[in-house]
Amino acid sequence: MKVGLVLEGGSRQTIFSAGILDAMLDENIVYPYICGVSAGGHAAMNYVTRQKGRLRHIIMPTKLQRGKKHANRILDGIQKESHALHYLAAYGAMPFDFQTFFNSPVECEFTLTTCETGRPAYLSEKNDEKNLLDIINASSSVPMLFPVAQIGIWHYVDGTVSDPIPFHRAFEKGCDKVVVISTHFPGESVTDFRKYSPILNPMFKRKYPNLFRVMMVRFRRYTRMFEELKQLEKAGKVFLMRPESDLCDLFETDLDRLNASYAMGQNYATRRMAELKEFLK
């Protein structure tokens, strides 16, 4: 029985996932296949290396990592914080264990959206540190907020644009069952790029028409995706873990709210651990 793990992004809301994953690490749960998208890519990396507490640490604003209780998203700069997360943190106070990651038998993929085609790309890297970090950065390059990322001849934006929760990919890779960790609670609205079409149109429509079309239908794709997850959950093919109430903000800067979302994840995982272990059999 091959069980995969799929990790949705959500910027700093991914601290909820950190709480769940740390609880899983305490139970020595191992998955042979893991796929992360956007900030979920960091969750995937750290689960492969089994570095408990690291995701919780690096997802915090850098000021909070240094002992402050508050940060400022405007003064600190979203792009500066993004660079710190995707590149600097790998060599920071809690460095990423590249050697363990590269030597691990776990297959780990990251979901990106290819600008030229509008389709998802599932990339992996088990040799080159810089390329791994470039993939993580590209997977989190949210349109309008961050520049398009180039890897080789292709250009990429955030993987959630084309495949927000890549559970289909896990089944394609031979998984019989899939554990899915989402950062969206039931009924929560998701980003509707149609609202920003006056901005996105001049940025993408002419240069990347396929990407633009995908962004305009993303909202409907999310709705259908959760409907399908519910059906797969009923069929015993998916174990869906998601918050039961609102989490901290996507770009949260308050330490107490971030810690509360982490604790929410840990408590949720503890309550459902027996159920999860039964699913994994």
Image (cartoon, rainbow, N blue to C red):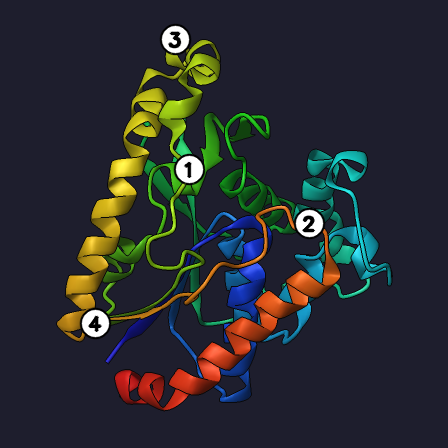
For mark 2, what is the residue? 85
Disc 4 element? loop
Which amino acid type corresponds to the residue marked 4 in the rendered image?
Asp
For mark 4, what is the residue? 176
Position of residue 219 measured from the top left corner of the image (x, y, whole percent): 31, 37
3 or 2: tag closer to the N-terminus: 2
3 or 1: tag closer to the N-terminus: 1
Compute the Cα span from label 2 to label 1: 22 Å
Residue drawn at x 45%, y 58% as measured from the top left: 183
Q: Is residue 205 above or below residue 47?
A: above
Position of residue 43 measured from the top left corner of the image (x, y, whole percent): 54, 62
Disc 1 element? loop
4 or 3: tag closer to the N-terminus: 4
Report the disc number at residue 78: none
Residue drawn at x 70%, y 57% as measured from the top left: 60
For mark 3, what is the residue? 206
Residue drawn at x 79%, y 49% as measured from the top left: 71
Compute the Cα span from label 1 to label 4: 31 Å
Compute the Cα span from label 2 to label 4: 33 Å
Disc 3 element? loop
| Residue 62 at least partly seen | yes
2 or 1: tag closer to the N-terminus: 2
Counting other residues with Cα less than 10 Å from the Cα at mark 4, is it few (<14), some (14-19), or many (20 or more)? Answer: some
Single out the mark in the foreground, 4 or 3: 3
Compute the Cα span from label 3 to label 2: 31 Å
Looking at the figure, which quarter contains the C terminus? bottom left
Counting other residues with Cα less than 10 Å from the Cα at mark 2, is it few (<14), some (14-19), or many (20 or more)? Answer: many
| Residue 92 at least partly seen | no
Which residue sits furthest right? 67
**Left-right relation of 167 to 59:** left
For mark 1, what is the residue? 191
